[in-house]
Amino acid sequence: MGKDILKGESRDGYVKIDRYNESKIEAVATHYKDILSQLGEDPEREGLLKTPERVAKALQYLTHGYDLKPDEILKSAMFEEDYSQMVVVKDIEVYSMCEHHMLPFFGKAHIAYIPNGHIVGLSKIPRVVDAFARRLQVQERLTNEIRDCIQNTLQPKGVAVVMECRHLCMAMRGVQKQNSVTTTSAFTGSFLSNDKTRAEFLRLITASLD
């Protein structure tokens, strides 16, 4: 098991902290050096000398969600509260990696829940999205995982998740449709059984505050 290394870089008062597993970085970088050769490149030329290591670090960061426990993220900020109206967090940025081609897909998630005795710190919902998104994914499963985590942990009266993403595996290869957007949705409880509740959620996530 490799050792986790922390590196900090100070720039204008901002300290960037990178955490990575040294042995994993070395192993993945070795494979990427071979891949560059197989693609017809020279991994020893100046511009590519550090590329395998950079890619290995990038991949470790982009998949660090495997090390996170989304339910524990929610449990860390659950509070008893007598509030029973819809709570909506919309326009949550999503960045993930398609498991079929390991190309990015990205967009926004809109999430709502109806409390049933407990609310959760608002920042925890985007953190849950990140915890699942920072893995090799498909958008359909990602949508369901977010829904199920919130439902099973908070036990609310209902959960709604809508996700809108652009997939580079469609834009850069295959059909090469640059402007296509994929929308997925998942509901539980009141959002599933009550048309008015679901319609209110959809209205809220498309409404402007301006």
Image: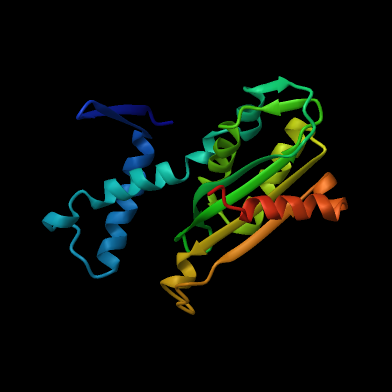
Nearest the viewer among 39 and 200 is 200
Front residue of 5 and 30: 5
Which residue is pictured at 60% across the width and 36% down the height? 125
Taking the image as drawn, is residue 138 in sight?
Answer: no
Q: Is residue 134 visible?
A: yes
User: Residue 47's x, y, as percent?
Assistant: 15, 56
Which residue is the extreme one toward the left? 46
Location of the N terminus by quadrant is top left
Number of numbered markers: 0
Could you tell me which residue is drawn at 72 percent across and 50 percent down? 201
Q: Seen from this angle, which residue lies furthest right?
A: 193
Q: Is residue 150 left or right of residue 12?
A: right
Give how far across and how far down residue 23 sits, in percent. Answer: 36, 36
Q: At 49% across and 71% down in the image, what residue appears?
A: 170
Determine the image quadrant of residue 84: top right
Check the image and report above or below for 71 versus 95.
Answer: above
- Which of 36/135 is in front? 135
In the image, taking residue 163 as reference, residue 203 lies left or right, namely right
Establish if 21 lies above or below 36.
above
Instruction: Give the percent coordinates (x, y) of residue 7.
Output: 28, 28
